[in-house]
Image: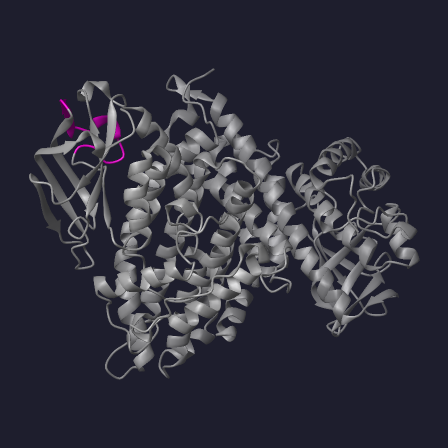
Amino acid sequence: MQVEHHVAVPDPAAGPDIYRQHARTWLRANLPDSMRADSLDWRAPSLAESSAWEAAMYQAGLAGMTWPKAYGGHGLTLREHLAVNKEIGALPMPESVSSIGKELAGPIIMAVGTEDQKQAFLPAILAMRQFWCQGFSEPDAGSDLARLRTKAVQEGGQWRINGQKIWTSGAAKAHYCLLLTRTGTVADKHRGLLMFAVPMDTPGIRVVPIKSIDGKESFAEVFFDDVVVPDSARLGAPDEGWNAAIRVLSIERATNRMYRPWRFECELRQLIAACKSDAQLAPALDDGYVQRRVGDLVCEIDGLKGLVELTVARMLRGETIGARGSLTKLYWSECHQAFAGLALSLLSHVGPHSSPLARRAQQAFTTAYLFSRAETIYAGTTEVQLDVIAQRVMNLPKDLT
Amino acid sequence: MSHEELRPEEFAQAADAAIADALTRADPRAMAEVLAQAGLCGVMAAEDDGGLGLDLAFALPIAHAAGRLRLPLPLPEQILLARALAGTPQAAALAAGERLAGIAWHGSLQTGHARVDNGLADWVLVADGAGAALIDASALPREAQAALDPEHPQTWIALAGAPVLARLDEQAWDALRRQAHLLLAEFANGAAEGALQAAADYMATRVQFGRPLSAKQAVRHLLARMRLLQDVSSAAIRRATQADEYGAPRDTRPALAGALANAAFVIEKAIHLHGGMGFTWELPLHRALRAVRRLDAAFAGLSRDAGRAFIQSV
């Protein structure tokens, strides 16, 4: 892959417009055609290719924007982060292969880790030398972490861990697992939860891939049988670490992958371009019903952009976002499912006779349609988000006060 | 101009009080007088026309409050016309609340007829070629279309021989429409917020099976969805008021189309959640629904327009 590795990153004091222009210019000059979902040269990138691309983005100042310079970040604000994300969204590039590291493990380590842990993990995550997986969910504890069973027992200067995780995305490639355990019994519910950074090559860890409906093996079951880690693998103290992590997670839910509405718009453009390129599909775009459905999506994407920009404006004013991240998560997941449903129906007649762009779009958006089933499930299901909004945003009473 | 000392949020509180005060008057003209005295009709009008000379940011909370409190007057249109007609005697009369004005979102001088959402308007702005003309509608033949709202019927006006009082050129008419999209979106969003609040309050106190209905997950989830859509409308309107990343004005159609659809959903569900009471004339939620559906009828096809424009842009 030919990408620039020594890039003059602009001074953020020049303002978000300059930074955005830098992002726009660099991304358009360097994103390989083979990684553009709307290109006829597209092919699924290998892990190494994706990793190299993200490392190059980082070198160009387009990842780790808000992380402190001391840990390899660029020390910028959410203002530049948003400006860059708009440009990332505007191009049909692959999703990060290290989102768990960058959006989950990294911010949590930043909040609860020791200085040694921050130095060991954070720069490596940004430079794409280290992949992480998330060991929270268990067969009996999905959204309800009070039922978590994976147990950590202290034995002198080390911890012995036994239990099972499930739905662990990227477990097969991960170097580390951000593992949530309990030090007591299930009767302790939310008390005694403890996090670890567990190297995935530790003896006793077994990864069993699970095939998902999009045909991939993107998640797995992970078994921990007498896995022993040193005390230095512990992230924070029992309770304390997890409580801090929850606060980080609520911010992350509101700020991660801010590019989504701009990416959805980019996908909608690809869909329209594909239809226009094909003599049989193009007439559908003159249909009032189709125009209406496209218009409804444009309205929803616009509203989602509004939610994202409002979140950034509030955070820059120093306000807390708290449970409001649930509003954004709920809205983007359903918005994208609506897009994918429209794409599937508009491209349903694509065949060998169709234009190359239409065939490319059908392949891309059929996959997107299937993958989007996961979007209302992961990171808190729709039902969990609705509960959170009712309970913590609206304060709806469950009893008479 | 934007007042340095005054912030839109502070102005919103005063707007709330003035609208609540106006609603105690039975006669719409007396309502308009109260609103004008509080500076609401002329909030954007030029100071020379008796206005406050403030920008759209100050009119938005007024439109929101008018929607939330279900003010039965075309206040957003009055505010915008008092500004757009700056320097004419009509602007001063509108800022002073002496006359009521509306905008016809259907019809034109060329088609010979036009529809306003609120039949009280003395003066009506009507499309005229690429621009628009303010006509004196007081003596023109009119037909009330009362099926949707018998109290405030949509009104068709026959425009043959209509006296033209003032004209707006294409640029001014475009600018006025953009601002109207945003103010009317905020009006609908205010109506949705009022309905949501009423439903949430009622669900928290209505006891069945030993607990408030707000304890029921089906009810909680529906209220959460209503809240989501109302928040999305607010965010979309806020965004549409701001210039885009390159300093150009943003398309206002998605914000209005979204706000109308979201408000209709929220108010319909608020009526539903009130049970049998929701279907009564006494509970005022039907007034909010009628107001939003009048706007929906006025701007029917906006979402399709936005879709068509997007398709053309690719």
- The image quadrant of residue B213 is top left
**How many numbered markers are drawn?**
0
| Residue at x-position 41% and y-position 22% | A398
Residue B227 in the image: state x and y as whole percent. 49, 39
Q: Is residue B75 visible?
A: yes
Task: Indicate whether residue A142 is drawn in magenta.
Answer: yes
Q: In the picture provided, is B294 more to the left or to the right than B229? A: right
Residue A347 in the image: state x and y as whole percent. 32, 71
| Residue at x-position 70% and y-position 48% | B57
Q: Nearer the viewer, residue A237 or B123?
A: A237
Q: Nearer the viewer, residue B248 or A377?
A: B248
| Residue at x-position 83% and y-position 47% | B42
Residue B294 in the image: state x and y as whole percent. 63, 52
| In the rendered image, the vertical position of residue A39 relative to residue A27, given as above or below | below
Task: Indicate whether residue A72 is drawn in magenta.
Answer: no
| In the rendered image, the vertical position of residue B262 relative to residue A363, given as above or below | above
Q: Is residue A386 visible?
A: no
Q: In the picture provided, is B235 more to the left or to the right than A233? A: right
The span picked out in magenta is A140-156
| In the rendered image, the vertical position of residue A231 relative to residue B292, given as above or below | above
Q: Nearer the viewer, residue A24 or B164?
A: A24
- The image quadrant of residue A211 is bottom left
Q: In the picture provided, is B11 more to the left or to the right than A379? A: right
Q: Tell me which colouring the rendered structure shows.
A: one colour
Q: Nearer the viewer, residue B126 or B257?
A: B257
Residue A122 in the image: state x and y as whole percent. 32, 45
Quadrant position of the N terminus of chain A in the picture: bottom left
